[in-house]
Amino acid sequence: MRVVIMLLLTVFVALQYRLWFGKNSLPDYWRLQQEVEKQQQTNQSLERRNKVLYADIENLRKGEEALEERARNELGMIKKDEIFFRILPSERMPIDD
């Protein structure tokens, strides 16, 4: 009877070791779960960015106003006979006492 109990105890300990420290153990599973969550957050962020880019592309395909706005903001272009004013913020704002 003692031999059977010792054998069962040995098998139990071996299984517990594998569960906690072996390949594909619980800590590995938990680590992979965290990596999946991080990847899902990254994917959601990229999906939002892609939606904005697709909307921007559609806007550029359809309207001339969006094209003009982009040319003005990103390239600094102006129309013929148009005057461009650029207002720069001062380095320090005076504080009234």
Image: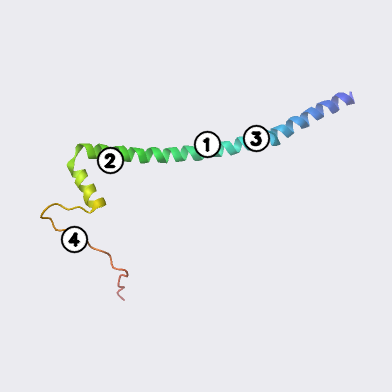
Quarter where residue 52 is shown: top left
First along the sequence among labels 3 and 2: 3
Rendered image: mark on residue 85: 4
First along the sequence among labels 4 and 3: 3
Residue in the image at 20% along x and 52% along y:
77
Task: Report how far apart the C-alphas of labels 2 and 4 lie in the structure.
Answer: 26 Å
| Along the line of sight, the residue nearer the viewer: 54 or 16 | 54
Q: In this view, does 40 lie above or below 94?
A: above
Q: In this view, does 48 lie to the left or right of 65?
A: right
Q: What residue type is labelled 2?
A: Asp
First along the sequence among labels 2 and 1: 1
Quarter where residue 28 is shown: top right
Point out the frontmost of discs 3 and 2.
2
Q: Are circles 3 and 2 on residues that touch, CB within 8 Å?
A: no
Q: Which amino acid does label 4 sit on?
A: Phe
Rendered image: mark on residue 56: 2
- Identify the image's colour scheme: rainbow, by chain, secondary structure or one colour: rainbow
Density class for disc 2 (Cα within 10 Å; few <14, some 14-19, many ≥20) is few
Q: What residue is shown with label 1? A: 36
Q: Are circles 3 and 1 on residues that touch, CB within 8 Å?
A: no
Q: What residue is shown with label 3? A: 26
| Along the line of sight, the residue nearer the viewer: 17 or 8 | 17
Q: Which amino acid does label 3 sit on?
A: Leu
First along the sequence among labels 2 and 4: 2
Task: Report how far apart the C-alphas of labels 4 and 3 lie in the structure.
Answer: 63 Å
First along the sequence among labels 4 and 1: 1
The image shows residue 67 at horizontal and vertical percentages of 21, 44
Task: Report how far apart the C-alphas of labels 3 and 1 lie in the structure.
Answer: 15 Å
The image shows residue 31 at horizontal and vertical percentages of 59, 39
The image shows residue 32 at horizontal and vertical percentages of 57, 36
In terms of secondary structure, where does tag 1 sit?
helix
